[in-house]
Image (cartoon, grey):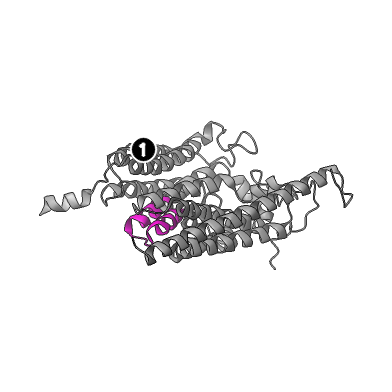
């Protein structure tokens, strides 16, 4: 496992875990905003062009 | 800055893991918030895009987590002195206070912002108010200054059904506030029953909980008083077109047990001995003297859970709510 700050294996593993958690959180947030945008825009499109 | 943040820069005993940050969000409390908010959202009986409903619940959960992190940041001095809480991430030194503060602010802002943009601004406003009320009014002010701390502060824990209702319908009618009122009135007997057998912690930490300030006998009487107010409130949804027959039978049957336990507690000497716990972390393992308080504490959780679950089940099964108030009016005319 990489340990660029020479902080010991336990601290390096904890840092890696935190980094992965932040990355997953950010990706989830981006996906969420994308999906919400599509839904909101979709509703507006349907409202503007009723069948 | 006040002198309470004495543990802001503790000596770190172990590197912070991502699980420590999850613990800052009080996941058990968060699950209760999700449950009550979901009940409010579904009881609104308003069609809603399921993805947006999920986003609304997620925002409420994240907002609850953010306010919990702010609470853990501010209360780290109190938590360090209480046996039940001294293992939390900030007092134990695994997470620095400043990190908990940053996480709390970030999650609070993101949850309110996303709720407003994705759902509606009434629910976002109510969510923001809930977070502020818990983190500022309760945590920073009431908790340390008055024995009525959990009575008034209980509003923060009571609001999620109204946030959920507002998310679904864009309104917050009387029935939404009835759910809020039930949790609000449930909070004092629930927390005071617990504090009757954990009061040594609160006394040591300087938190003016009711048994510490007014004594156990007064607390037991007040628990009975609040219980007498709570049960009619729990029956009210069957009168206002919110709860059906399943709900009414559970609220009435459970209410009778609740009152019996509160009366037994009032007649007991629970809390007269300062601490009845068998171990540091024990919430349910107590000596004989604390059993009346422990029984009410445990049953109060079950009672609230089953009542809200009944509302959810009725909604899913399509059980029609009762309108006993309208029926009574019709009979009177």
Q: Quadrant of the C terminus of chain B?
A: bottom left
User: Which residue has dot 1 on it?
Assistant: B254
Answer with left or right where residue B37 lies relative to residue B86: left
Answer with left or right where residue B72 lies relative to residue B184: right
**What's drawn in magenta, residue-wise?**
B158-183
Predominant SS along the magenta part: helix
Closer to the camera in the image, B331 or B34: B34
Label 1 packing within 10 angstroms: few (<14), some (14-19), many (20+): many
Q: Residue at x 50, y 46 (%)?
A: B32
Instruction: Locate residue B63: give its quadrant.
Output: bottom right
x and y percentages locating residue B264 in the rendered image: 41, 37
x and y percentages locating residue A32 in the rendered image: 56, 55
Extreme-top residue of the structure? B288
Observer able to see residue B206 = no
x and y percentages locating residue B255 in the rendered image: 35, 40
Q: Quadrant of the N terminus of chain B?
A: bottom right
Q: Residue at x 60, y 57 (%)?
A: A30
Q: Mark 1 — on which chain does it sit?
A: B
Instruction: Locate residue B107: give its quadrant.
Output: bottom right
Q: Residue B285, relative to residue B239: is it above or below?
A: above
Closer to the camera in the image, B257 or B57: B57
Q: Secondary structure at mark 1?
A: helix
Q: Is residue B21 magenta?
A: no
């Amino acid at each position: 496992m990489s340990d660029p700050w020479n902080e010991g294996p336990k601290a390096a593993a904890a840092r890696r875990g935190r980094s992965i958690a932040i990355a997953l959180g950010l990706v989830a947030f981006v996906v969420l905003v994308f999906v919400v945008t599509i839904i909101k825009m979709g509703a507006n499109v349907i409202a503007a062009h009723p069948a | 800055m006040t002198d309470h943040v004495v543990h802001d820069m503790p000596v770190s005993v172990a590197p912070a893991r991502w699980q420590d940050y999850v613990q800052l969000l009080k996941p058990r409390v968060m699950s209760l918030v999700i449950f009550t908010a979901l009940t409010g959202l579904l009881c609104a009986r308003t069609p809603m895009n399921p993805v947006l409903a999920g986003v609304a619940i997620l925002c409420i959960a994240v907002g609850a987590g953010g306010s919990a992190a702010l609470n853990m940041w501010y209360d780290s001095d109190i938590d360090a002195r209480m046996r039940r809480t001294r293992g939390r991430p900030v007092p134990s030194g695994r997470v620095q206070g400043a990190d908990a503060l940053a996480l709390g602010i970030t999650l609070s802002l993101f949850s309110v912002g996303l709720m407003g943009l994705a759902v509606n601004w009434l629910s976002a406003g109510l969510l923001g108010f809930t977070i502020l009320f818990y983190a500022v009014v309760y945590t920073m002010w009431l908790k340390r200054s008055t024995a009525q701390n959990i009575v008034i502060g209980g509003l923060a824990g009571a609001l999620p059904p109204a946030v959920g209702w507002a998310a679904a319908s864009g309104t917050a009618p009387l029935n939404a506030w009835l759910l809020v009122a039930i949790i609000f009135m449930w909070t004092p007997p629930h927390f005071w029953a617990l504090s009757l057998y954990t009061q040594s912690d609160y006394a040591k930490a300087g938190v003016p909980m009711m048994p510490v300030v007014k004594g156990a006998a007064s607390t037991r009487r007040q628990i009975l008083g609040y219980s007498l107010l709570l049960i009619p409130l729990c029956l009210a949804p069957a009168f206002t077109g919110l709860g059906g027959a399943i709900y009414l039978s559970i609220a009435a049957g459970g209410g009778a047990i609740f009152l019996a336990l509160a009366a037994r507690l009032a007649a007991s000497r629970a809390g007269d001995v300062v601490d009845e716990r068998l171990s540091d972390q024990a919430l349910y393992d107590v000596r004989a003297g604390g059993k009346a308080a422990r029984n009410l504490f445990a049953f109060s959780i079950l009672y609230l859970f089953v009542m809200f679950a009944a509302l959810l089940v009725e909604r899913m099964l399509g059980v029609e709510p009762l309108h006993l108030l309208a029926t009574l009016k019709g009979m009177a005319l």
